[in-house]
Image: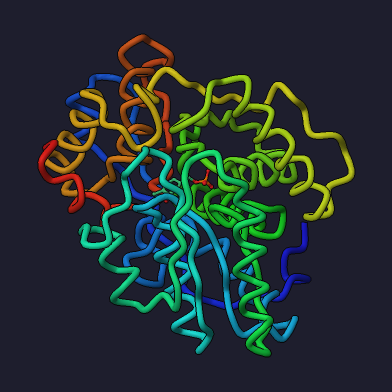
Amino acid sequence: MNLAKFARRRYSAGQTPLEALPRLSAALGGPNIFMKRDDLTGLASGGNKTRKLEFLVADALAQGCDTLVTVGAVQSNHCRLTLAAAAKEGLKCRLVLEQRVPGSYDPRASGNNFLFELIGAETITVVDAGADLAAAMGAVAEAVASLGRKAYVIPGGGSNALGSMGYVACFEEIMAQAFDQGLRLDHLVCASGSAGTHAGLLAGAFGTCANLPITGINVRRPRAEQEANVFQLAQTSAALAGITAPLPRDSVVCLDEWVGPGYSLPTPEMVEAVRLTAALEGVLLDPVYTGKAMAGLIGMIRRGDFKAGENVLFLHTGGSPALYAYQPIF
Ligand SMILES: *Cc1c(COP(=O)(O)O)cnc(C)c1O
């Protein structure tokens, strides 16, 4: 793979840390847990969307666009980071917010919602779950065009093949760091949402012949649906990255046992995972994505999915600003 062929803006300084979590590992009594700290990427409070936006915003600039338009849930980390990238580039940004939980939009809410206003969304359009999000963004883009400006529409989570190049690159970064540290990784675990992160990692693993199993922990969808989404995007991402061999379907694994009652709705396992990781390692997870993904990793350890002595890498995809909107449940 030759990712330097893509236009790219840089929003992070160097690599994010890949570090051991010895106290969490000891408390769980399972494999050695390591963490890739993509909560420490650049832009406001960091997170996985920063890596995707490096490619997407470069494309927007190349096309002469002056306004980013995107969509997310009412506490969307992706919307916060798209706003931050727009601010940094001197672009405007308009958001479409989807109330995945009916009535969940509160303009005065804390967390990411507060940051939408602070960083400065030009407009916010709220739609209900099940709305046609592409059509809603298209209408916003038309309103931008009617002002004589040019919008660049970014899909939810920045999850298209170009955005996924951020996680192809992250996979290469992980392998280089593991080699440098003399660390033999046996498994990679990440949250699986709009699928770009998981798909990019899968394409990266396939393209580098890493032979490293990757397990996605779903935050919203049932297993079959999520695996189909991830497989589809992993195939187009692999093709964009220059991989010509067919990506194996059986490399796509998305577990749905830790979604609970639905997207963004708390579970006791999530609360335990967030509390344990904070208290033992001083690392902040989030209630919607990484808390459920870590609950999945803990659940996998407890049910014996890993052998003693194995090294498991957890990808921390960020999201801690949402914690402040969920304070009462902790
Ligand atoms: C968006 C997000 C994810 C999920 O990544 P996808 O690429 O959408 O699957 C995981 N963690 C956090 C904190 C996120 O904001």
Q: Quadrant of residue 162?
A: bottom right
Q: Nearer the viewer, residue 284 or 319?
A: 319
Residue occupying the point 43% across, 33% down: 219
**In front: 205, or 266?**
266
User: In screen coordinates, is 224 left or right of 72?
Assistant: right
Q: Position of residue 195 (x, y in %)?
A: 59, 41
What percent of the width, then of the height, locates residue 199? 64, 42
On the picture, is 211 further left or further right than 268? right
Q: How is the image coloured?
A: rainbow
Q: Would you say 65 lies left or right of 12 here?
A: right
Up-down relation of residue 107 to residue 282 (above or below)? below
Q: Is residue 247 above or below residue 281?
A: above
Q: Quadrant of the N terminus?
A: bottom right
Query: Percent x, y for residue 92?
Result: 51, 82
Is there any visible trace of residue 169 in the rendered image? no
Q: Is residue 83 left or right of residue 276?
A: right
